[in-house]
Amino acid sequence: MNQSLVDLHEIGILPLYYNADASIVKKVVQASYNGGARVFEFTNRGENAFDVFVEVLAFVKEHLPDMGFGIGTIYDAATAQKFIDAGTDYIVTPCLNPAVGEVCQKAGIPWIPGVTTLTEIYNARQAGAEVVKLFPGDVVGSKFVKAIKGPMADVKIMVTGGVQPTPESIGEWFGAGAYAVGLGSNLFPKEVIAAEDYSWIEKKVAQSIAMVKAYRSKVK
């Protein structure tokens, strides 16, 4: 299995973030790394997202070489190929588009597609996805994850959307059988970014990882 997917499971959280200012993104990624994160998703949500991604990826490769830095919010194969050519470590999509999976397979990088049904999970796996992203998690619910693990015991589900960095929320999702969780605005509140309080982010990331570890050691 790809190292980024191994790290995703081992650490248990995938921080995800977008900002049009590359210097801010670098500081957020650095703080996340300092807090223990070894995978990070930059979301493709702005006009200059590609340029920011390229600049931050170069920073990551130089200063944080053991961090997997991927791109999220990719809808089509052409955009996926553009980021693959730029050097992304993996691609995360909000929905299931097998054409994106195809270009990722050709490039030998992981593809984590968004799913909300058992059929989509099945089709994603058939198309080569080792890990799928359940989105939006808070709408679909943890009971869905638990139910899916019946017919598909070996499925690897990363839950994104509505996951809180609290022992209750972490316990709920990992208790249901989540492979990992994606955390965005709860790790990077706007007011914290505005105040440039990157030590807060570092601590919040570290706390979230510790919660996953604590839950897993409790249920062993």
Image: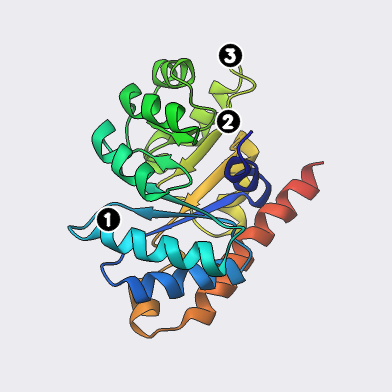
Q: Nearer the viewer, residue 180 or 125?
A: 125
Which residue is denoted by mark 2 in the rendering?
A: 156
The x, y position of residue 150, in whole percent, is 61, 18
SS assignment at label 2: loop
How many marks do you count on the picture? 3
The x, y position of residue 197, in whole percent, is 45, 83
Residue at x 40%, y 32% (from the top left corner): 113
Q: Is residue 93 above or below residue 23?
A: above
Residue at x 59%, y 17% (from the top left corner): 152
Q: For the residue carrying disc 3, how many other residues have a C-alpha within 10 Å: few (<14), some (14-19), or many (20+)?
A: few
The mark lying in front, picked from 2 and 1, is 1
Which residue is at the far right?
Answer: 220
The x, y position of residue 42, in whole percent, is 38, 56
- Amino acid, disc 3: Pro
SS assignment at label 1: helix
Which residue is denoted by mark 3 in the rendering?
A: 151
Which residue is denoted by mark 1 in the rendering?
A: 50
* Quadrant of the snapshot with the C terminus: top right
Residue 71 located left or right of residue 46: right
- Are dots 3 and 1 in contact, CB under 8 Å? no
3 or 2: tag closer to the N-terminus:
3
The mark lying in front, picked from 3 and 1, is 1
CA–CA distance in space, label 3 to label 2: 13 Å
Q: Is residue 78 above or below residue 171?
A: above
- Are dots 2 and 1 in contact, CB under 8 Å? no
SS assignment at label 3: loop
